[in-house]
Structures are given as C-alpha cells and as structure tokens.
Image (cartoon, rainbow, N blue to C red):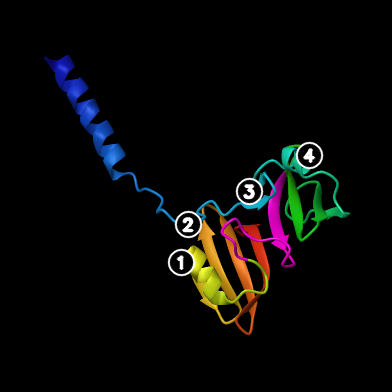
Amino acid sequence: MKKILCICFACLLLICGVACTPEEPEVPGANYAFRSGSTEIAIDAEAAPILAALGEWRDYAESASCAFEGLDKVYTYAGFELQTYPMNGKDYVYMVMLYDDTVATPEGVRIGQDAAAVTAAYGEPTQQTDTALIYQVQGMRLEFLLTSGVITNIKYCKEA
C-alpha cells in the first residue's frame, strides 16, 4: 500500500510540475534568427557550419576579444555582417547587422521601411525609444534603429 501511495504522490508531483511550468509566449519570429538564402543564422549558434554554408565573404576582420579568450571576428557579406565570439575553442554567432535594403528579416522587414512595418510584423516591442524598437527573447535582442521613424539599421545580437 505504501508503495502505491508513493507512486501516486510522485505522479502528482510530476503533474503539478508540468502544469506549473511557464510557457514561452507565442510571438511572431520568437527565435529572431536571420536567414540568408536557406541558411539560418541564430545568435549563440556555432559559427563554423553557418560560415561554410554562406560561402566566401567580402571582407574579414578580427581583434582580440575584450570579453572572451581569443579573437572576435567580423565577416562581411552582401547586405549584412556576422560577428562571432570565441568560447571553448569554437566560434559562436554574437551579432548579425543588416546594413542595406538588399536583405530583410524573415518576417519581411528591411531598412528604409517605417516603424509601423516593424510593429505590424513583430507586435509591440519590449523597449521603445525615439530611435529604436527592441525585441528581447531567450538571451538575445532584435533591434530596429530609426532615424525620423525610418529603419536605418537592423541588429540581431546577444543580450548583454
């Protein structure tokens, strides 16, 4: 009898634990990953397979990392830059910066559109100023930088 009660109590605890676990809200673009062609570029993803899939870059720069042991690296492609950080002998995606209107977010937002295009695609931002709309989720940020209400820069980055 004690064995059955213990099993029932354990099952009850398991059910309560599952029922009380908060779920991530459903948000359009909730993972906030950039796509270049068929290649998804997510913050904190290992960089090597992404770089291999993207192919030759237009420009490359590296410098000693201030926050990590090793080199921070910046790869420039048509319309965007990808910055990596080193950790445990591998490079990981730190930031993706869109810098012209030849590329767009997977939700179709691009430089040159107005702030209304951002809120139509993503909903209300986590933070908002006169010069930025910021969406935060799961340790990263998606930032739309604005000048006079027009998108001038789009940045996916690791949360500081």
Q: Secondary structure at mark 3?
A: loop
Give the mark nearer the N terminus: 1 vs 3.
3
Q: Nearer the viewer, mark 3 or mark 2?
A: 2
The crowd level at tag 4 (other Cα within 10 Å; few <14, some 14-19, many 20+) is few
**Few, some or many C-alpha atoms within 10 Å of disc 1 (few <14, some 14-19, many ≥20)?**
few
Disc 3 target residue: 42
Spatial CA distance of label 1 from label 3 is 20 Å
> Quick check: 9 left or right of 106?
left
Disc 3 from disc 4: Cα separation: 15 Å
Residue type at numbered disc 1: Gly
Q: Are marks 4 and 2 in contact (CB under 8 Å)?
A: no
- Mark nearer the viewer, 1 or 3: 1
Say whether disc 3 or disc 2 marks the residue closer to the N-terminus. 2
Q: Residue at x 85, y 50 (%)?
A: 57
Q: Amino acid at mark 3?
A: Ala
Q: Which residue lies at the image location 61% right of the left edge and 69% below the top edge? A: 144
* Residue hosting label 1: 123
What separation in Å lies between label 1 and label 4 (alpha carbons)? 34 Å
Label 3 with label 4: CB-CB less than 8 Å = no
Dot placed on the residue nearer the N-terminal end, 1 or 4: 4
Decide if residue 126 is in sight here. Answer: no
Mark 4 to mark 2 CA distance (whole Å): 28 Å
Secondary structure state at the residue bearing disc 1: loop
Q: Nearer the viewer, residue 17 or 135?
A: 135
Q: Taken as a whole, is the magenta stretch helix, strand or loop? A: loop
Q: Which residue has dot 4 on it? A: 52
Q: Earlier in the sequence, mark 3 or mark 4?
A: 3
Q: Residue 78 falls in which quadrant of the image?
A: bottom right
Asked whether, in this view, residue 124 is left or right of residue 80, the answer is left
Asked whether disc 1 touches disc 3, contact meaning CB atoms under 8 Å apart, the reply is no
Q: Which residues are magenta?
A: 92-109
